[in-house]
Amino acid sequence: MEQVFTHVAALVTVIILIPFYRVLKGPTVFDRLLGAGAIGAKTMVIICLIGFIYKRVDMFVDITLAYAVLNFIGIIAVSKYFESQDEQEE
Amino acid sequence: MMIQETVAVALVLLGAIFMFAGSVGIVRLPDFFSRTHAAGKTDTLGIMLSLAGLAVYEGWSLNSLKLLVVILFVAIVNPVSVHALAKAAMEYGIKPWFRPETGETEAKEK
């Protein structure tokens, strides 16, 4: 079964590279944030898969939960910051 | 035992498909607000399915309970964070994009 999880983890890693294009190219800063948020959310699945591959599920599930919380707080903080800024360069 | 593994692998692969759809949606959709659909909904479903598949593989244990907590957390949190981004973008002054022939024409930010 570890083979299957390794292949799925590799697949999800490739899937993570796709939003990087939006992070690089995104016209507005919010596109970049959206791409980064999507990447952060997908990383959680990879962390959990790694936990299953190395049979340390109880440790990695906690890491996944912590990562979910941190990702959420980060996005809320940044969107709060950009909310107060009005558009200058447009 | 076989059924549990096949169901788990099926769920994880289905989740991977939805995550792929979400990623492609983030890249290809024309405007920030339409991209929030992809990032907020499709990604959340993909992650939830994958984690549900892992929880099924784990069976009845404390870890699958924790995985369930993570799934519920993602189900609530991911759309909320994308909503916060969209609200901030609205305050920042980003206009939604409209298709050219419907009257109001906007610069198509590709």
Image (cartoon, coloured by chain):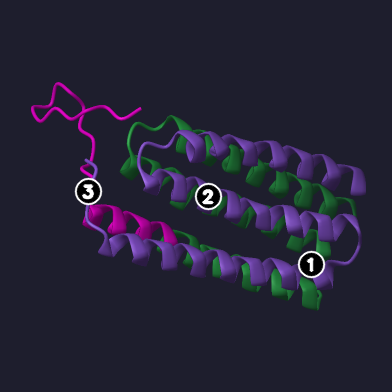
Chain colours: A purple, B green
| Range drawn in magenta | B81-110
Residue at the disc numbered 2: A36
**Which is in the foreground here, disc 1 or disc 2?**
2
Q: Amino acid at mark 3?
A: Gln
Please state if B5 lies on the left or on the right of B85 as rendered.
right
Residue at 69% across, 66% down: A64
Q: Nearer the viewer, residue B32 or B45?
A: B32
Residue at the disc numbered 1: A60
* Tag 2 secondary structure: helix
Same subunit, labels 1 and 2: the answer reads yes
Report which quarter residue B55 is drawn in.
bottom right
Residue at the disc numbered 3: A88
- Distance from disc 1 to disc 2, alpha carbons, whole Å, reads 22 Å
Q: Residue furthest left?
A: B103
Q: Main secondary structure of the magenta part?
A: loop
Residue at 70% across, 49% down: B11
Q: Amino acid at mark 2?
A: Ala
Q: Are marks 2 and 3 in contact (CB under 8 Å)?
A: no
